[in-house]
Image (spheres, rainbow, N blue to C red):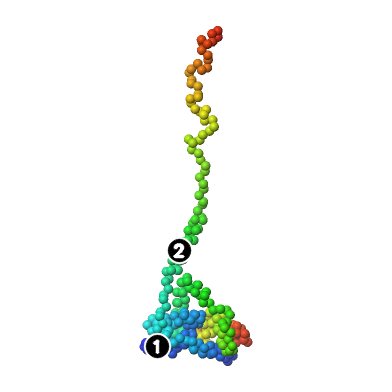
Amino acid sequence: MSDHDQDLEAQFQQLRLEDAARTPSFERIRSRRAPARRRPWVPVLALGAAAMAVVAVLVTRGRPHPVAAPFTIAVGDLRMPTDFLLDVQSVPSIGRSDDWFPSLSESKGNPL
Amino acid sequence: MERRDLESELERLHSHGYAWAMRCCRGDQTEAEDVLHLAYVKILEGKAQFEGRSTFRTWLFGVIRYTAQEQRRWQWNQALRLGRWWREQPAEVAGPVESLAAEESRTRLRHAMGRLSTKQGEVLHLVFYQDLTIQEAADVLKMRVGTARTHYERGKARLRTLLGGRGGDR
């Protein structure tokens, strides 16, 4: 400190006097109850949970959205308007000419 | 040192130690009392031992400062502390209007000290408030004397500016 600092010294001296009047006694401080030690694992757990939440969000966002299954129809379920033509009962039977030619009795005079 | 000698030395330096603890705790009275208590316990139980390499006061200030740092680390670990810290911040505006010029002067000085950087505030407190030399302040703060001197000069200039005084470095 230099001689130029006397103004500051005087101000600090005032401060010291004021503080001295407010200082709790030595006995009070010495016999004070020890401050409860904080639990260091609480913030560790909180940080861990936060990290897991962030990872979960990132993983969920990174995964591609499931694509809807394309519209498919099983072959057996397909019904077309012309399906009735495939009904075998409506198909003429092969090998009988009756259905195609009139009987001889009905066609006298016919050279065939 | 015997326990009884330690106790009488601590008691003799109690008001200085308390003021330094307040400084280390940025004016938080409860925290300062906790820190000082823990420092006394360390010393009286022999966890911190004075080996005579400096004055007892310088050594005591070092123990208090270290204990305050330790305590601060614990506090930072507490998430709820943030809320408490926020509520307990001193208001920017001075409290009730003081009529006495001396009271105003002290209030201005406290506010100005609070606006200095941590290192500057600590060095100025040790030199002006505790009457330590810059060398002793450097010992307490575990820094080189040149560094302490720089903090001292810059802090002093800033303090004068904040106090609206004559300004400039001396």
Few, some or many residues within 10 Å of mark 2 (<14, 14–19, 20+): few
Q: Decide: is A6 above or below A88.
A: below
The label nearer to you, 2 versus 1, is 2
Name the side, left or right, on which B126 lies relative to A4: left
Q: Decide: is A73 above or below B164.
A: above
Front-lying residue, B75 or B145: B75
Q: Decide: is B115 above or below A2.
A: above
Q: In the rendered structure, which amino acid carries the disc numbered 2?
A: Ala
> Residues at marks 2 and 1, common chain?
no
Few, some or many residues within 10 Å of mark 1 (<14, 14–19, 20+): some
- The image quadrant where one finds the C terminus of chain B is bottom right
Q: CA distance from mark 2 to mark 1?
A: 47 Å
- Residue B140 appears anywhere in the view: no
Q: Percent from the top left, x then y, of residue B105?
A: 58, 87
Q: Which mark is residue B7?
A: 1
Q: Percent from the top left, x then y, of residue A99?
A: 51, 17
Front-lying residue, B95 or B119: B95
Q: In the rendered structure, which amino acid carries the disc numbered 1?
A: Glu
* Quarter holding residue B74: bottom left
Front-lying residue, B3 or A110: A110
Q: Which residue is mark 2?
A: A49
Q: Chain of mark 2?
A: A
Q: Chain of mark 1?
A: B
Name the side, left or right, on which B42 lies relative to A102: left
Q: Secondary structure at mark 1?
A: helix
At x 52%, y 48%, the residue is A67
